[in-house]
Image: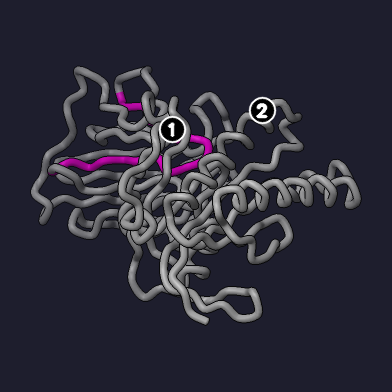
Amino acid sequence: MGATATVVFADLTGSTGVFEMLGNAKATEAVTRLTQWISQVCESHGGRVVKTLGDGVLVVFPQSAPAVAAVVELQRSHFTRIAKWPPKLRMHLQVGMAHGDIVVVDGDCFGDAVNMASRLSDLSGAEQIWATASVIDDIDAPEDGVRFRSLGPIPIRGKSEPSVVYRIEWQEEVMSEHLTVPAPLGLGSGTRTDPVLGKIELQWLDVNASFRAQDLPIHLGRVDEAQFVVNDQHVSRLHAKIEWRNNTFVLTDLSSYGTWVRFTGSDTELALRRGECVLHGSGEIAMGAPFSDFAVPTVNFNLSGSEVALAHRAGGRAR
């Protein structure tokens, strides 16, 4: 039977460490309680639980608005709950959402929306909610304290073309403090260049890559979907995006744990947590931890006229 629905895939991250610390029996009980709670919250908003898959839950909703309300409640409640847990026992939530036609067979569901929700859950990272444009289009307006932020076209495994993806911002303090972080005063407002001449050169260890302005946006992350892969434990799957906007190069943090930028000649560090800044001159980008962490993957960048050069130094390897 065919139907149009909003599909939610909510997955717990960090369960491997929990099994190592608690053992199979206690860890299984903890994961089961959490997946049951996820199911109950979704059902309270009108969702139908299709199935649980290990530490993940697949749910379908007739519309996108109640689905968004459900996953926002999940993230906010779970974030408050695990703040009291020992760090090594914390299992974070990552959520993917898609809206479209599905086929229901014997209670299970299939279709592109199901596949997209699963893919976005995998890519999103801890404490994040990623949704397709079709989900956003199905909603008249977000509820108070919630915002939709476009991440631009992102390559999705199994799709022939990149798909426009949105991140649903559910943390009010993030929206008020971190949505946009400008470049420091006195260091310029970005390097303005002709998009035909503008070029970004990326270097990680001994690997170099070059992208023209018209080829942007590009993503930096540790999965193959990223145009520039930084395979390091500090780095999120799709950690950051560099795009060409208003004749400037803009760096946007998409990660779970943040990105830090430091410009040459300044000791000031810009902390981007789901925020953005204009790249100019030269400097460094730390991915996943502040510069004070000696093990953090550090990216050097340099804009020479119409160029941005990024060099990755520190642990990990490029592809």
Q: CA distance from mark 1 to mark 2?
A: 18 Å
The amino acid beneath tag 2 is: Ala
Q: Is residue 316 visible?
A: no
Q: Residue at x 38, y 24 (%)?
A: 177
Percent from the top left, x then y, of residue 123? Answer: 51, 55
Q: Residue 162: x percent and y percent? A: 34, 66
Q: Nearer the viewer, residue 253 or 151?
A: 151
Q: Nearer the viewer, mark 1 or mark 2?
A: 2
Q: How is the image coloured?
A: one colour
Q: Position of residue 187 (x, y in %)?
A: 21, 23
SS assignment at label 1 = loop
**Is any atom of residue 242 visible in this view?**
yes
Decide which of 17, 282 is in the foreground and name it: 17
Find the magenta span and give its range. 247-264
Name the residue located 78 percent from the left edge and 51 percent from the top edge: 32
The residue to which callout 2 is attached is: 83
Number of residues whose C-alpha sits closer than 10 Å to that of mark 2, classed few (under 14), some (14–19) or many (20 or more): few
**N-terminal of the two: label 1 or label 2?**
2
Q: How many marks?
A: 2
Residue at the (66%, 57%) spot, across then down:
56
- The residue at which mark 1 appears reads as 273
Check disc 1: other Cα within 10 Å, few if <14, some if 14-19, many if 20+.
many
Rendered image: mark on residue 313: none
| Res 122 → quadrant | bottom right
| Main secondary structure found in the magenta portion | strand
